Structure formats: structure tokens, C-alpha cells
Amino acid sequence: MDYNQLAENFFKALKSKEQVKMWGRMNGYTQGEHQVLFYLYKNAGKDILPSDIAKYTGTSTARVATILNNLEEKGLVTREISREDRRKILVSITGKGRDKADASRCQFIQNIARIFEEMGEERTQSFIENFQLFIEIGMKYAQEEKEKNK
């Protein structure tokens, strides 16, 4: 078995235009907005800086600023100057943002459930187990690379 060819096929499937469009339709946000909104949702109540968001998303602070502008225009997030350090801007999710994140999550779960239903119970169970194994092995290799590059 040619694992390099299988990896190439997998990579192509992940990056296909159709696949990207499918995920976009499923979650209804640009990828950046989706990531930022859910990061803020999971960390509600904490002091969150735009640089924290950039680190989490792996994007530049300039890109995060653009995303935050879009989310702020939609009334999903707010930005305010820190009372402790006026040089810092704190970002938080609004009630509307929480509602939108909840609704988006529910819609995403429903969409995935429809796919799983069509796949059938056995294939779905196998897919989930194999995907979890894939992630575990991938994380192991990522950790090894991190250790090697210290």
C-alpha cells in the first residue's frame, strides 16, 4: 500500500473547493469569524485580548482586527479599553453573539447528524473511531516535532 499516495488523496479531499464550500454552508460564517466567535463563547467572562485570539487562530493581529470589525458591526462582539491597562483592548461576546454561537452550533450538529444518518450507524461509528485515532497519532507526531525543534 502506498501511504504517500493515500496521504496525497486525503490532502486533496481536505482542500478541495467543494469541501471548503460545504463547510462554509454548514456553519454560515467565514472560517475566521466562526473560530473567533466560538473562542469568545468558550472563554466568556475572561479578559481576552486580540493577540490571544490571533494566537488561538494562528492568524495575524491585522486579520483578527478585520474579523472583529465584522463581528462588531453585526453586534456579536464588543471591544473596550482595559481599566487596569489603558493600552489594552478587551474583547467580549455579546448576548446576541452567544445566541448566534448557540444557534450555529445546533445547526452544525444537525447537519453532521444528517450526514451520519446517511452513512449509517456502522460506518459512522467506524469513522469516529478512526478519526479519533488519526487525531491522537497526529498529535503524537506534532509533539515529537516540537520536542525535536527545541
Image: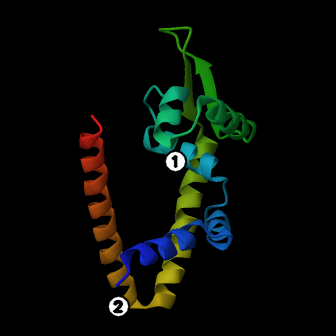
- At 63% across and 44% down in the image, what residue appears? 96
- CA gap, disc 2 to disc 1? 31 Å
On screen, residue 118 above or below 7: below
| Residue 36 picture location, percent across and down | 56, 43
- At 50% across and 8% down in the image, what residue appears? 85
- Mark 2 residue type: Glu
- At 59% across and 33% down in the image, what residue appears? 60
| Residue situated in front as seen by the camera: 14 or 7 | 7
| Residue 8 picture location, percent across and down | 49, 72
Q: Which quarter of the rendering shows the C terminus?
A: top left
Q: Is residue 96 left or right of residue 51?
A: right
On screen, residue 115 above or below 104: below
Dot in front, 2 or 1: 2
Q: Residue furthest right?
A: 73
| Residue 146 picture location, percent across and down | 29, 42
Q: Which residue is mark 2?
A: 122
| Residue 129 picture location, percent across and down | 30, 76
Q: Secondary structure at mark 2?
A: helix
Q: Which residue is mark 1?
A: 38
> Does the CB distance between marks 2 and 1 fall below 8 Å?
no
Per the rendering, the mark at residue 20 is: none
- At 61% across and 53% down in the image, what residue appears? 31
Q: Which quarter of the rendering shows the N terminus?
A: bottom left
Badge 2 crowding class, 10 Å Cα cut-off, few under 14, some 14 to 19, many 20 or more, is few
On screen, residue 44 above or below 125: above
